Amino acid sequence: MPTALAIDIGGTKIEVALVDMSGRIRQRARAGSIEVANGEELFSRLARLVDGIDLAAVDVCGVGTGGPMRAAGVAVSPLNIPVWRDFPLRDRLADLTGLTTHVDNDAKALALAEGWMGAAVGVRNYLAMVVSTGVGGGIVLDGRLLDGDDGNAGHIGHVVVEPEGTMLPGHVRGVLEAEASGTAIAFRTGRSARHADLAERERAGMLVGRAVGSVANLLDLRLAVVAGSVALGFGDVFFRAAQAEIDRVAALQHSAGTRIEPAGLGADGPIVGAAAVGFTGLGHQLIGRPR
């Protein structure tokens, strides 16, 4: 059975694991991705995690990381990892592991994972989102994950949802990531998103719902699956507020009835998604198949 070295790189943590084609996760390890002096220090931290993994029977390396990036992860510049700007992640990892390496946006990786064995199995048109330190998205239409010119299609975190909203440094005023991400909530309230009050949790859900409803109107899809520490941590309050706003915004014949659901793979979605990036790179068709 093919096995992937899966690597998930986020704004607060990096994680590595072995994942096989059944979705089984083995040899999992993680470390923080903050409080590093420069990009080389962060890569060294990642390399130490990889060194602890037995790569003897591994077929491919799949990576999910924050964006934006240049096509195929030749260079990555995650907004929430400022020490990496045009960092040559794909080639550095290939040199480290000796494996063919495929890199994609972490939210697009989640879209693959959820269509493979999560809440979107058998669905040919859907949006997957990560609402965490940042906000990202991946779009599947007609059973195919959209890429765009440089692999950044679906970057829903930079859709404007509050034109006169928050001016988060490094962002256009009022984009979703500047309003509903963990970084934005901490910036605006002075407290970690873990300590957000009820109003803040409802507001984050409502603004995510506003973005999802707009995407449903634009792209003729009726399902959004959402993961990430903010969305899953805020729980039912977040999802109820999001659904109410979707019901208000997605009112066209082709978008009415759009629903939002927690990602079926929960906290495992990002690492399974990274593996899915690798398996897709090997030519395996994971999504868009009938149930």
Image (cartoon, rainbow, N blue to C red):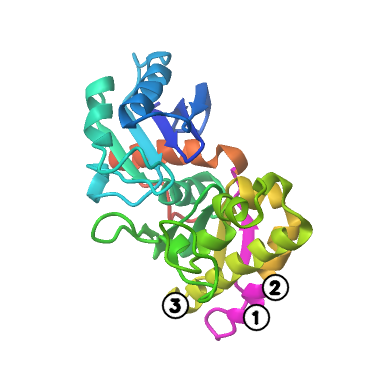
**Residue 165 within the magenta-colored segment of the rendering:** no
Mark 3 neighbour class, 10 Å CA radius: few under 14, some 14 to 19, many 20 or more: few
Q: CA distance from mark 2 to mark 1?
A: 6 Å
**Tag 2's secondary structure?**
helix
Q: CA distance from mark 3 to mark 2?
A: 19 Å
Q: Could you say where residue 253 lies in the image, as x and y percent from the top left?
A: 55, 86
In which image quadrant can residue 240 be found? bottom right
Instruction: Give the residue type at disc 3.
Output: Leu
Residue at the limit of the structure toward the right, as seen here: 198
Q: Quadrant of the N terminus?
A: top left
Numbered range of the magenta stretch: 245-265
* Disc assigned to residue 272: none
Circle 2 Cα neighbour tier, 10 Å, few/some/many (<14 / 14–19 / ≥20):
some
**Residue in the picture at 66% in, 55% down:** 189
Mark 3 sits on what residue?
218
Q: Secondary structure at mark 1?
A: helix
Question: Which of pointers 3 and 2 lies earlier in the amino acid sequence?
Answer: 3
Residue closer to the observer: 50 or 166: 166
Q: Position of residue 282 (x, y in %)?
A: 28, 38
Looking at the image, do the residues carrying marks 2 and 1 touch, with CB atoms under 8 Å apart? yes
Relative to the observer, which residue lies in front, 64 or 20? 64
Q: Nearer the viewer, residue 88 or 55?
A: 88
Q: Amino acid at mark 1?
A: Arg
User: How many labels were placed on the picture?
Assistant: 3
Please tell me the numbered disc located at residue 248: 1
For the point 70% across and 60% down, which residue is it?
A: 200
Identify the secondary structure beneath mark 3: helix
Q: CA distance from mark 3 to mark 1?
A: 15 Å
Which comes before the other along the chain, label 3 or label 1?
A: 3
Residue 42 higher or lower than 105, as above or below: above
Query: Which residue, given by chain and number where applicable, does mark 2 sit on?
Result: 244
